[in-house]
Amino acid sequence: MPKYKHVEDILRIMRNIEQVRNIGIIAHVDHGKTTTSDALLAHAGILSPKLAGEARALDYLDVEQQRGITVKAANVSLYHEYKGKPYVINLIDTPGHVDFSGKVTRSLRVLDGAILVVDAVEGVMTQTETVLRQALEEYVRPLLFINKVDRLIKELKLSPQEVQQRIVQIIKEVNERILTFAPDKEFAKKWLLDPAKGHVALGSAKDKWGITIPMAEEKGIKFSYFVEAYAKGDKAAIEELFKKAPLHETLLDMVVRWVPNPREAQKYRVPRLWKGDINSELGKAMVNADPDGPLVVFINDMRLDPHTKRLVATGRVWAGTATAGKEVWLVNAQKPNKILQVSIYMGPDREIVDYVTAGNIVAMLGLDDARAGETVVDIKYKDQAAPFEQLHYVSEPVVTVA
Ligand code: GDP
């Protein structure tokens, strides 16, 4: 039995870009980013569902966790079916919390959408605002997950009506930031969160449930149901919420429905984020996410594989197809390199594959002269090559060791 039963499915679907989404989870510290990631990973069959909530699949190993299955992966490809159709959702790790080294911006660059996690009790905090602002500046569409609603009932003892008011208030606060920080007013309006449409989920990552308004209506789940369940401490009723509205399904449905596929996203992101001539062959291939065009990859992560001790470059393919043996030009380093191996992420491991097409996340060996933030292009197109907009960050070590 293959270790990850969905790898073949993922490879097949990846080649059909309409069925791909690139997302990340962003949050103020302690609002539940890790717990939410775990719930998603459990669904993908990468961790045992029993371990979700305890395992820390997107976190660094620490002494406590070394005995668990916790590994920091730069990306995990998830498989999800929505209305009977299969999708690959690349969940890209964004650095834990705000840092000014440029790591956040770099990882946001490879996403098209982000789930902003906000603690229902704390509401919008300074880092919520910072990560949301950074996402908007990278033309990453935000969706909202209001987490820890159990605390509103268990700790603040709010009534169903008060819970509702609190939720409305948080959405309003996030929307105000979207209007303020979206660099382009067209997107500010388009990306305002409308709970009635299903842009907002609320629930508890710890108890692994979450609902959107359309889903609650469809499944007949009322506010009073979960408020009463927590007020009474009714474990069976809370378990029922997980069965009726599992968080992974709610969030991944929301992502498929509202995060643009890579081709849609590249149409507006490439002209705004890439420095080159969008009318050149390279530019056109990027705008169209053309798998048959010249290769362009933006590297957001460089790290040593702890097993092979080789440098692994992870990035998003913006155009063309990454294959082993391809000669490439590193735009920032101004050096030629050769791709020696191409793989995709599955849980903590990488699976070697023959090729990875435009719109997807790829891990490559052989790009030893690259550092995070590098733009890699097919060497034949060196003359049209241009970097993504200059990243502003303080200097830092070239390599992070996984
Ligand atoms: P991160 O710093 O954003 O990654 O946050 P974590 O996922 O590590 O969560 C921070 C703390 O909040 C942990 O102690 C979690 O167990 C707790 N937490 C996460 N989700 C929930 C929830 O739905 N309800 C409650 N009450 N606590 C939660």
Image (tube, rainbow, N blue to C red):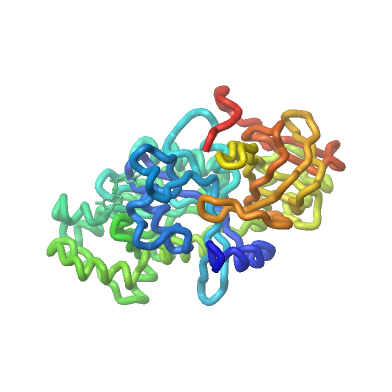
> Horizontal placement of 292 versus 68: left or right?
right
Q: Residue at x 56, y 73 (%)?
A: 85
Number of labelled discs?
Answer: 0
- Foreground of the two, 352 or 196: 352
Percent x, y for residue 229?
18, 66
Q: Residue furthest top?
A: 395
Q: Residue at x 55, y 57 (%)?
A: 77
Q: Nearer the viewer, residue 213 or 18?
A: 18
Residue 88 shown left or right of residue 271 in the figure: left
The reply to whether residue 183 is in sight is: no
Residue 204 in the image, given as x and y percentages of width and height: 30, 57
Q: Residue at x 52, y 38 (%)?
A: 402
**Split into 4 quadrants, where in the image is the N terminus?**
bottom right
Quadrant for residue 315, please give it. Answer: top right
Q: Nearer the viewer, residue 66 or 113?
A: 66
Please state the horizontal and vertical placement of residue 241, each as a whole percent of the image. Answer: 28, 68
Please say if 297 is above or below 214: above
Q: Nearer the viewer, residue 116 or 305?
A: 305
Above or below, 36 against 386 in this view is below
Residue 50 visible in the snapshot: yes
Q: Is residue 373 left or right of residue 39?
A: right
**Residue 227, x across and y down, in percent:** 19, 63
Residue at the location (61% across, 37% down)?
309
